[in-house]
Amino acid sequence: MKNKICLSVLLVAFIICNTQAQTVRRVSNAVGAGAPYTTIQAALTAASNGDIILVEGSPTNYAGAISITKQVTIQGPGYLLDQNTGMQANLYDAVAVATISFDAGSAGSIIRGMKTSSIDINTSNITVSNNYIAGGSVDMNTGSNNIVISGNYLLNAIIRSFSNMTSLLIANNYAGGGISFSLSLTTLAVVSNNIIAAGGTNFYLQNSTIVNNIFLTAGTAIGETLNSTIQNNVFVSASQTGADATNVFGATASSLFVGLAGNTTDTQWKLKAGSPAIGAGVGGTDCGMYEGNNPPYKISGIFTGQPTINNFTTPGTVPANGTLNVKVSAKVN
């Protein structure tokens, strides 16, 4: 009963905020949840273009590779919910343990609020935002152009391979494995306000704009800078080929961020008082994933406008044939 009441309130809030959507298809594999779909792929099979696949957090991971061949929005509850308390009443993430692939027919799709192993993009006009990529990478393959990768927490890398591409925005992410592009590719990219923890000879960004980032690698951060603008970034390394005098060099992680002590996996990357990244960005803005002209990184991937249930209480006992008094509080972020 608790899960059904809780999700019915969230569905109403979500539908109100998405009046243009055709259908909201609820997915949950939690015992007793009573969702119409227990797998993401089953909801996708039933979906039409424009539908929203609303994936509920669950103690059981969602197994199996997922192929998206329709224009849909996949919406999870957020991530790190057990750390960043108060974000959602349900502290379980929606975890897809296999690769999610955007294949032919899925152009225009969005995925957000999910925790997944890896994402493959095999078509154009895809937005990957506010997700936690736990094991693999976000990999852009042949035929993928007009891609937005923003506000994600990636333990591994953002990768482009096999062919040239145009119109790529990488903004306000934490990229633990850095960014990797083939040297021969012509990439027209904007890379802005990321925290990039690894770099080196595999980080080739030609014909691109690289601004307001924080690079944490002590060695070579960017391996190739042909025809690229590199301005107003903060580097731990002492120098960077192609970077002008607007960049800051020789910073230390301890001087940049508040750190993990007393904070969570993603909030540790907020700038501390006196950080050399404060005011170091274009026009005196701050560098890093919590700042910038694009939507800044959101704690736990809870994006602006997302409805969440932040409190759900029921009495401990109910007399036989008595009334179950349930108190639910929800908000639109």
Image: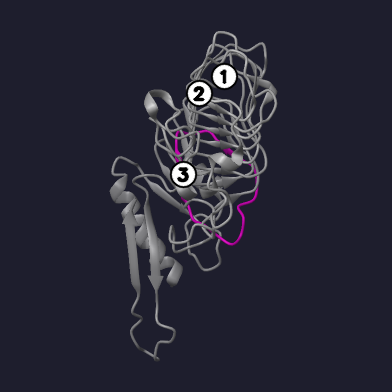
Residue at coordinates 38% horizontally, 56% vertically from top-left?
308
Q: Is residue 167 above or below residue 139?
A: above
Q: Which residue is mark 3?
A: 273
Q: Would you call the spot at circle 1 few (<14 residues within 10 Å), some (14-19), or many (20 or more)?
A: some
User: For residue 124, which numbered disc appears in the image?
Assistant: 2
Residue at coordinates 64% horizontally, 26% vertically from top-left?
237
Residue 221 position, x and y percent, is 64, 24
Name of the residue lying farthest toward the front: 274
Q: Is residue 96 magenta?
A: no
The amino acid type found where label 3 is placed reads Ala
Residue 68 position, x and y percent, is 54, 36
Q: Secondary structure at mark 2?
A: loop
Q: CA distance from mark 1 to mark 3?
A: 44 Å
User: For residue 143, which numbered disc appears in the image?
Assistant: 1
* Residue 102 placement: quadrant: top right
Q: Which residues are magenta?
A: 54-76
Name of the residue lying farthest toward the bottom: 320
The amino acid type found where label 2 is placed reads Ser
Q: Secondary structure at mark 3?
A: loop
- Give the number of the mark in front: 3 or 2: 3
The amino acid type found where label 1 is placed reads Gly
Q: Earlier in the sequence, mark 1 or mark 2?
A: 2
What number of labels is visible?
3
| CB within 8 Å, label 1 to label 2 | yes
